[in-house]
Amino acid sequence: MALPLQKKLRDPPMKWNDTYDIAAALAHKHSDVDPRYVRFTDLLAWITALDGFADSTDRCNEKILEAIQMAWIDEVS
């Protein structure tokens, strides 16, 4: 029996270094948003609110957010 998609996304949970998984999840959840115009403060909040994401904001920095944003842009282009 196959696991539901949500279970697959949460096992193991996404961490800050899962750039492409996070970008894909953001593209799915915020399909009406152009990622080029998302502020890092909003991006941080959206990532930490994703189902299947479990990591500390203390481990995040601007470089990580920029990498996720660039991957999200690539995902929707």
Image: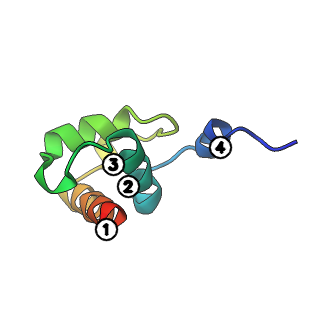
C-alpha gap between disc 1 and disc 3: 24 Å
Please name the residue that numbered disc 2 is placed on.
Answer: 23
Q: Residue at the location (21% across, 60% down)?
A: 66
Q: Are marks 1 and 4 in contact (CB under 8 Å)?
A: no
C-alpha gap between disc 1 and disc 4: 25 Å
- How many residues crowd around disc 3 within 10 Å: few (fewer than 14), some, or many (20 or more)? few
Q: Amino acid at mark 4?
A: Asp
C-alpha gap between disc 4 and disc 2: 17 Å
Q: Residue at the location (39% across, 39% down)?
A: 29
Q: Secondary structure at mark 2?
A: helix
C-alpha gap between disc 2 and disc 3: 17 Å
Residue 55 seen in this snapshot: yes
Give the mark nearer the N terminus: 1 vs 4. Answer: 4
Q: Residue at the location (22% across, 45% down)?
A: 33
- How many residues crowd around disc 4 within 10 Å: few (fewer than 14), some, or many (20 or more)? few
Give the mark nearer the N terminus: 2 vs 3. Answer: 2
Please name the residue that numbered disc 3 is placed on.
Answer: 59
Please name the residue that numbered disc 4 is placed on.
Answer: 11
Residue 1 located left or right of residue 14: right
Label at residue 74: 1
Give the mark nearer the N terminus: 4 vs 3. Answer: 4
Q: Compared with residue 41, is residue 36 higher up or lower down, i.e. above or below?
A: below
C-alpha gap between disc 4 and disc 3: 20 Å
C-alpha gap between disc 2 and disc 1: 9 Å
Q: Secondary structure at mark 3?
A: helix
Label at residue 8: none
Q: Are marks 4 and 2 in contact (CB under 8 Å)?
A: no
Give the mark nearer the N terminus: 2 vs 1. Answer: 2
Give the mark nearer the N terminus: 1 vs 3. Answer: 3
Residue 16 seen in this snapshot: no
